[in-house]
Structure formats: structure tokens, C-alpha cells
Image: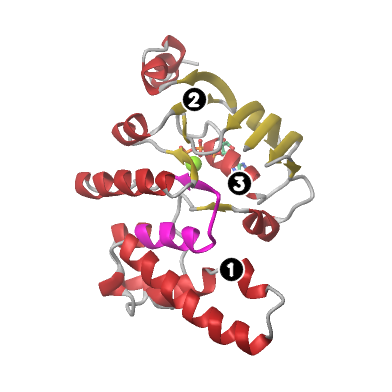
Amino acid sequence: MLELKAVSRHFGGVRAVDGLDLTVNEGEIVGLIGPNGSGKSTTVNLIAGLFPLTAGEIVFRKQPLRDVPVHGRLKLGIARTFQSIRLFGQLSVWQNLWVAQNSPEDRSRRGFFARWLGGQTQVREEIAQLLEFSALGHKQNELAANLSFGEQRRLELARALAARPKLLLLDEPAAGMNAEEIGQLRQRIVDLRAKGITVVLIEHVMELVMGVTDRIAVLNFGQKIAEGTPAQVQSDPAVKKAYLGGS
Ligand SMILES: Nc1ncnc2c1ncn2[C@@H]1O[C@H](COP(=O)(O)OP(=O)(O)OP(=O)(O)O)[C@@H](O)[C@H]1O
Ligand SMILES: [Mg+2]
């Protein structure tokens, strides 16, 4: 579904991502882990199209993404959440989801009024489903800025889902969550896969990433140092060394 071929992104002298090969298959939950500054968020930013590659190529469903801007990638079905939450704080929960809607059918050949009326009902229904999925129904009229941290993370996920992604990139979705919230997040990720969404999960919370992923790639200094099942990666000496501060 997604293929990164020898992808690099350098910032001045910093090789944030350095010759990374990574394949994500349809229906998989793939973990991307590594120490701080190892290039995980940069990888997500490159897939989402935030800035160009220094070298290499990214292909999504056989389409090279080089010239596809962020909104084009969103339309193709690539959505993401941010490591540092980015919501419209002065909009309500419901409004945050409304503006994130990306319904290709609504832009079809049907007439404007039919689209407006039909689209309205359909979109409202979808938002109601997203609110339920995210356990935010009771907060739908609350300003996003007034939500608790865990609720904001849930809204971020719901907002990414409002774009109807095929591929969902989650950048540390469990950061700042308590154990109960992490358990719920884990269930949501499993549910998303059951709905046919492919997931790339960046996470420092090992119990989550080890418990929910099919396969994990480990980055260190922008390079992939290991890849395999959670069990394989956990017992890999290079991974242990990277996490203990060696190089
Ligand atoms: N926009 C940027 N400009 C300059 N340097 C950057 C930029 N983005 C990332 N970097 C650098 O690239 C390297 C990789 O950063 P990145 O954010 O991808 O790491 P990460 O694996 O997500 O780390 P963390 O676990 O702390 O989130 C770091 O050295 C970082 O300082
Ligand atoms: Mg990061």
C-alpha cells in the first residue's frame, strides 16, 4: 500500500531520515519506534507531505507522491495526527469534526442543492458516529480548548478519521494518557483495522506498540536498525543498545 524507497530528509547537517526503506501492507498495523530524535515524526511528515524529500521516493497505492501536496494526499486517503495536538481551540468539538470532513461523494455530479441537503444529513450522521467512536458525544458542544488532554487526543484521532483515511498515521497518540485511556486507545486502533484502515503507529508507550502492532520498524539516527514482529524487535541486541543510549 505504502512504500518508502531510500527516503532521506536532511535539515542542514542533521540527517533526520537517512536512506529509509519501509513497506506498509494493506490492513497492517505497523509500529515505528526509536529513541528521541531518531526521525519518526519526520517520516510521518514526509509521508503526509509537509515538506519535500531530500532523496528517495514514496509511493502510495502505486502512485508516486512526489508532486502531490498535503491536501492531495489527504484526498488519496492519507491522514495523520500530530505529536503536539493541533485542534481549533475556539471551535466546538462538533465543529472541529465538521471542518475536517472530506467527502468525495459530496463533490459528485449531483446538483448543488441535492448535494447540500443530502450531504448535510450524511455528514451529520458521520460526525455522530465519530463522536460515539471517540466517546465524545457528551462533549460535542464544548470548545476544544476546554477538553481534558485525553479528550483532545481523542478528538485529534476523530478529526483524522473524518477525512475517511485508508492509511492513518498516528504520531504518539498515547502521550500523556493514563493506563485506562491507553487501553481504550488500543481497542480503537484494533477497531479501525477491522474497518479496513491501515495504521502506522509511532509510540514510546511500549505496552501499546508491542501489544497492537503486526510488525515494527526501529529507527536510530534516521536509519532503520531493525524490523520484525514485536517479539523479534524486543529481543534484538541493536534495539536494546539504541534504547540504552549507545549508538
Ligand atoms: N523542521 C525541522 N528543522 C530542523 N530540524 C528538524 C526539523 N524536524 C526535525 N528535525 C530534527 O530531525 C531529527 C529527527 O526529529 P524527529 O522529530 O523526526 O524525531 P522523532 O523520532 O519524532 O523524536 P521524538 O521521539 O522526540 O518525537 C532531530 O534531530 C530533529 O531535531
Ligand atoms: Mg516525534
Of the numbered discs in the image, which one, if any, rests on residue 218?
Answer: 2
Residue shown at 51% from the left, 34% from the top: 37
- Residue 224: give x, y in percent of width and height: 57, 22
Residue 161 point in image, percent of width and height: 47, 59
Which residue is at a point 62% across and 70% down the rendered structure image?
A: 105
Q: Residues within 10 Å of mark 1 (few under 14, many from 20)?
A: some
Q: Residue at x 62, y 38 (%)?
A: 1
Instruction: Give the structural element (helix, strand or loop) at label 3.
Output: helix
User: Disc 2 versus disc 1: distance between alpha carbons?
Assistant: 35 Å
Q: Is mark 3 within 8 Å of ligand 1?
A: yes
Q: Amino acid at mark 1?
A: Ser
Helix, strand or loop for disc 2 = strand
Q: Which mark is residue 103?
A: 1
Q: Quadrant of ligand 1?
A: top right
Looking at the rendering, the stretch of residues picked out in magenta corresponds to 154-172
Residue 45 badge: 3
Mark 2 burial class by Cα count in 10 Å: few <14, some 14-19, many 20+: many
How far, Cα to Cα, is label 3 from label 2? 17 Å
The foreground one among 210 and 34 is: 210
Compared to 114, does 101 lie above or below? above
Q: Which x, y percent locates residue 140?
A: 33, 75
| Residue 76, image quadrant | bottom right
Mark 2 or mark 1, which is nearer to you? 1
